[in-house]
Amino acid sequence: DQRICVEQCGWAQLTIVSASATEGCVVDISASEDPIFGTNQSEFRTTKVDFVLVRNYPRCVHENDYRSILLGLNYALLPSVNSLFSIYCATERALLNAELNRLARLHGDAFPFIDSYFVDNLGEGQQKAPTKYPVVVKVGSSCAGYGKMLIRNEQSFTDLRSVLLMGREYY
């Protein structure tokens, strides 16, 4: 007789106790501030993880970064609906686009993908401006539609770039 226990929590409630490729992953789940009625979410609990369903990114705009928890789950080789590596890649737009570029190269016209460019933004050097406008500039790894701007001409790009140089996020 095997019992299935489904636990639901946010990244902030999750702490990895141990993660091993041979022994699996044990986590602590702190009590939820807004528990679902009829569940044990109002209690602290410890559980061994067998499977993962991720419903939100472990990193977003101006919030905590929980990628280390994602890395621990991945280190324990846990199965998941989407691979934990793909979720990690989605937290870094450059990694995600690199994989899309790889698939476009592999499959050619059967995998249409809009041209994209990476700019590291680590200095005041003259990075190449787009040759065709309009373009959409996406900054960093932001999600939920944040961090993007439609640029209609080279002057607008120059203006935006002067603001981007104030930070270190790639675009």
Image: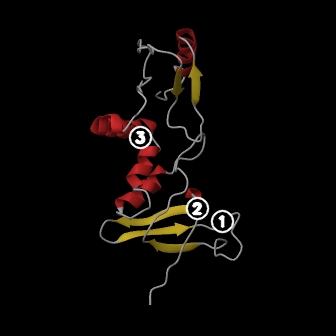
Q: Earlier in the sequence, mark 1 or mark 2?
A: 2
Residues at discs 1 and 2 in contact (Cβ within 8 Å): yes
Picture residue at 66% right of the left edge, 65% below the top: 32
Q: Earlier in the sequence, mark 1 or mark 3?
A: 1
163 or 156, which is in the foreground?
156
Q: Quadrant of residue 29?
A: bottom right
Say what amino acid the circle numbered 1 marks: Ser
For disc 1, the marked residue is: 32
Q: Residues within 10 Å of mark 1 (few under 14, many from 20)?
A: some
Q: Position of residue 28 (x, y in %)?
A: 52, 68
Q: Nearer the viewer, mark 1 or mark 3?
A: 3
Q: Earlier in the sequence, mark 2 or mark 3?
A: 2
Question: Is 84 on the left-hand or right-hand side of 140?
Answer: left
Q: Position of residue 7 (x, y in %)?
A: 55, 71
For disc 3, the marked residue is: 96
Find numbered disc 2 in the image and state the secondary structure of the residue it sits on.
helix
Q: Is residue 158 above or below residue 70?
A: above
Q: Position of residue 12 (x, y in %)?
A: 58, 57
Say what amino acid the circle numbered 2 marks: Gln
84 or 163, which is in the foreground?
84
Say what amino acid the circle numbered 3 marks: Leu
For disc 2, the marked residue is: 13
Q: What residue occupies the far left of the structure in this picture?
A: 106
Picture residue at 64% right of the left edge, 76% below the top: 40
Picture residue at 49% right of the left edge, 84% below the top: 3
Residues at discs 1 and 3 in contact (Cβ within 8 Å): no
